[in-house]
Image (cartoon, rainbow, N blue to C red):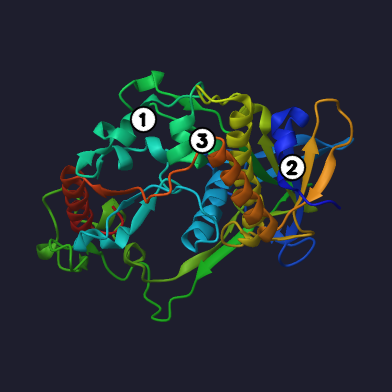
Amino acid sequence: MPELTIERLTDAVAGGAVALRSIMRLQPADGPGGKVFPPTFAVAATAENKYAVEERQVGDQVVTTVLLDSVASQANRAELALLEVWEAKDLEFPVPYVDFTGEPDLADLGRITVLEAPHRFADAIFRDSLLGGTLFRLSDVGQRITEACPGNATDMFRYAPTALLFGQWDSTGPKGGLGSKFQRAYVSEIVGLDAKIGRKVGSRIDPLQIERDAAVVYEHADPRQRWTLDSAEAAQEKGKPKLAGGDGRPAEINHGNIAPSIDAQAGGVTISEARQTTVLSLAALRRLRFAGKSRDAEVAARTAVAALGVAAIAYGYEADHDLRSRCLLIPHHSPVIEMVGRDGESPEAVSVDRESAAQLLSEASARAARSGIAWERAEIALTPAPKLIELLRRSREVSAREPVGE
């Protein structure tokens, strides 16, 4: 199988392909027939289960599928895979961040990067932080980001190219709902095939064997003490003398047995296999324009963004597929990327691994820089504004005062 070279990728981005596609077959870690646990969703009490189950066409058959990892979740995992190798300096591309380590009582937040903020560079975390002592939106970089749009993506490419890959809508910026919207070019999803809903059992044996009706438990007036058996010490001001408004039994404070039960709504599923489908839309990247630049320069910039997507596939594979508790999936094979043409013919398959993906990204970004569209090489480090610091501190004070369980 040929390797994905910079020449192949450039030709595909220039118009030789509509998309890059990777289809990965996976199995539960405990083998075929093993049970996995999908994400649960809020549903009516009468619903059969809490999973996203639907019929899909797979090949020439219609099968029952269950969503194991959504598009949004997959994007987050891809971003974290890129963040890990960026922090290890295995890949070089701009990753702006807000640094909380200068505030001792907030240092546990560490650095929150554009790859972690929910709305990427348009997130309130960046909006409410300082760059060079100036509120981000009022800084030169912030104003450039605010004005960046698909019709002129040069500054977004310069400061946060991953936003062009994973998408961004600046809906809370100065322009409100008219803020720039960059389409998501990288779309990935994992589904389980031939899904059969199972049941989960649960129980707890208390070593102390405290009886469920042993006493009435009250919320203590001093939240540090949590609970009391003395009604005189109870917190009465809220009109809720019993813990968390419950029935006052010891189970409210995690003492006592829990009778065995069966959960039929979120009891896991068995599947024949799982399938991860990742599509990188080159058509979406071709809609990005770089005002004042030549066609060759625009192709070079788009190719660099595509190379980031290829790296996300390669490094995401090495980050494993441990989606959540009891949902570890094992790939059947290493990543293979198909170059999907617009003529409907069988796509050309090419191989990629972390070394070739790193080389591809390095060559693509260098070509873009030579064409006059370069990534920012200097570190883009913000600090939280005083008002954001104060908001965080007040929020933590409230959290510390609230009793557990409320």
Q: In the visual, does 100 lie left or right of 79?
A: left
Looking at the rendered image, the disc whose residue lies closer to the viewer, 1 or 3, is 3
Q: Residue furthest bottom?
A: 207
Give the labeled residue for mark 3. 373
Quadrant of res 318: bottom right
Q: Residue at x 89, y 31 (%)?
A: 345
User: Alpha carbon of mark 2 to alpha carbon of mark 3: how far?
Assistant: 18 Å
Q: Is residue 400 above or below residue 116?
A: below
> According to the image, label 2 marks what residue?
7
For this rendering, which residue is in front, 145 or 314? 145
Sequence-wise, which precedes: disc 1 or disc 3? 1
Above/below status of 158 relative to 207: above
The tally of labels here is 3
Secondary element at image label 1: helix
The amino acid on which the numbered mark 2 sits, given as a three-letter code, is: Glu
Label 2 SS: helix
What's the residue type where badge 1 is placed?
Answer: Arg
Instruction: Determine crowd level at label 3: few under 14, some 14-19, many 20+ residues with C-alpha closer than 10 A.
Output: many
Q: Earlier in the sequence, mark 2 or mark 3?
A: 2
Q: Mark 1 points at which residue?
A: 144
Q: Percent x, y for residue 195? A: 75, 48
Mark 2 or 1 closer to N-term?
2
